[in-house]
Image (spheres, rainbow, N blue to C red):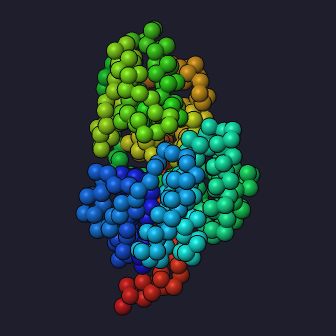
């Protein structure tokens, strides 16, 4: 079967969709990645994927550009002739769906998060909702990464209830993210793994850290992730330099392998405004790290309050400050117990094998004749 996967960055496909891609390649399917190219493209080609550059403005909201993007999707879809299209990220889901329906190609989108347009509210949210409603009408299967996002789409009448299915996020590889002991240091290290975006709660993280360090200099606050100037909610490098100069934040930069940094942390933090199913929290929990996150869709499904970590109020530096203080006062045994509970939850609910199995089952429903032909070849 010819499978096309489209997303707004090649690195997204490599870092978040790899288990599905590997499973498809292992079964003998031809996999094409249609995405804006970046330094992840060679690794995808090395895996065995065909990689095609997709020209798109990730950030812009121009009707003229979006119309051109639909035509561009249509051109690529027609030229590549896939049997099914797997889609991720907002623009690829919306405009890819429109182009695929015109061509009669089965289209399976994954709503991994609602995006800045949805979070901003007002007129922009109404526009985005209208686009979703039109694009997703008639699609048999839509994947969501948490029940809150699914229920919101149903309540807002963007989709019919029978279209929606749940995934445990992108899943996590528990053998790759193995548990390790908490660091034996006098200082307590809090780690936030994120791009520097307002929507991720970076400002609240910095403010809460500033407040508590006034009385608890033994606490350290780190951010691991790039400065992302291409996003509408990005925070500039100047702000980051100021926080570092004040001694509030340690910026660890961007690294492909986050495991050494999680291993050196006592607690991983994500004060985001809304998530699908945050990969950073899942990876940290798989390594038996306690978590602090906001009580919002996505985060609240990963973090069980006072069992695997702590939940705080969103957009509230004071609430986050209180969570920092509560965690800092917990003895090592309690922290370790939270970490073990988080690891157990990942094994039960968020193993990447669950995601792969649900994708393969959905594809078998959408393209049954191709799946049956493949199974016949494998038995022969």
Question: Residue 85 vs residue 243: left or right?
Answer: right
Question: Residue 136 vs residue 76: left or right?
Answer: right
Can the viewer see residue 169? yes
Residue pictured at 32% horizontal, 68% vertical: 50
Q: Position of residue 170 (x, y in %)?
A: 47, 54
- Most extreme residue toward the bottom is 380
Residue nearest the viewer, comparing 363 with 79: 79
Q: Position of residue 230 (x, y in %)?
A: 42, 39
Residue nearest the viewer, comparing 359 with 324: 359
| Quarter of the picture holding the C terminus | bottom left
Q: Is residue 335 above or below residue 187?
A: below
- Most extreme residue toward the top is 215
Q: Is residue 336 above or below residue 128?
A: above
Q: Position of residue 104 (x, y in %)?
A: 57, 76
Can the viewer see residue 220? no
Question: Residue 145 vs residue 51: left or right?
Answer: right
Q: Position of residue 338 (x, y in %)?
A: 48, 35
Residue pictured at 33% horizontal, 40% vertical: 258
């Amino acid at each position: 079967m010819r499978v096309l996967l489209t997303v707004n960055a090649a690195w997204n496909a490599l870092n978040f969709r790899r288990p599905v891609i590997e499973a498809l390649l292992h079964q003998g399917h031809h996999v094409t990645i249609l995405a804006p190219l970046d330094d992840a493209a060679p690794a995808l080609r090395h895996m065995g994927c065909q990689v095609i550059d997709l020209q798109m403005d990730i950030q812009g909201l121009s009707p003229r550009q979006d119309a051109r993007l639909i035509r561009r999707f249509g051109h690529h879809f027609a030229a590549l002739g896939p049997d099914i299209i797997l889609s991720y990220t907002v623009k690829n889901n919306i405009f890819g769906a429109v182009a695929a329906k015109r061509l009669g190609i089965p289209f399976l989108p994954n709503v991994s998060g609602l995006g800045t347009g949805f979070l901003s509210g007002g007129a922009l949210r109404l526009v985005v909702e209208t686009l979703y409603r039109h694009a997703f009408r008639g699609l048999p299967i839509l994947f969501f990464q948490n029940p809150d996002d699914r229920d919101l789409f149903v309540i807002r009448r963007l989709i019919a209830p029978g279209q929606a299915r749940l995934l445990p996020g992108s899943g996590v590889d528990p053998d790759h993210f193995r548990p390790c002991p908490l660091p034996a240091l006098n200082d307590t290290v809090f780690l936030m793994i994120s791009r520097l975006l307002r929507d991720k709660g970076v400002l609240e993280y910095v403010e809460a850290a500033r407040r508590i360090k006034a009385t608890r200099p033994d606490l350290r606050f780190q951010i691991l992730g790039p400065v992302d100037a291409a996003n509408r909610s990005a925070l500039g490098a100047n702000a980051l330099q100021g926080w570092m100069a004040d001694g509030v934040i340690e910026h660890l930069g961007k690294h492909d392998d986050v495991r050494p940094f999680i291993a050196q942390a006592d607690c991983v933090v994500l004060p985001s405004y809304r998530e699908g199913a945050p990969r950073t929290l899942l990876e940290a929990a798989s390594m038996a790290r306690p978590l602090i996150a906001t009580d919002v869709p996505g985060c609240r499904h990963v973090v069980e309050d006072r069992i695997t970590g702590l939940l705080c109020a969103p957009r509230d530096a004071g609430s986050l400050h209180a969570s920092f203080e509560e965690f800092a006062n917990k003895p090592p045994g309690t922290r370790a117990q939270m970490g073990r509970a988080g690891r157990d939850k990942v094994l039960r609910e968020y193993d990447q094998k669950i995601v792969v199995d649900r994708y393969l089952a959905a594809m078998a429903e959408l393209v049954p004749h191709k799946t049956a032909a493949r199974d016949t070849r494998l038995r022969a």
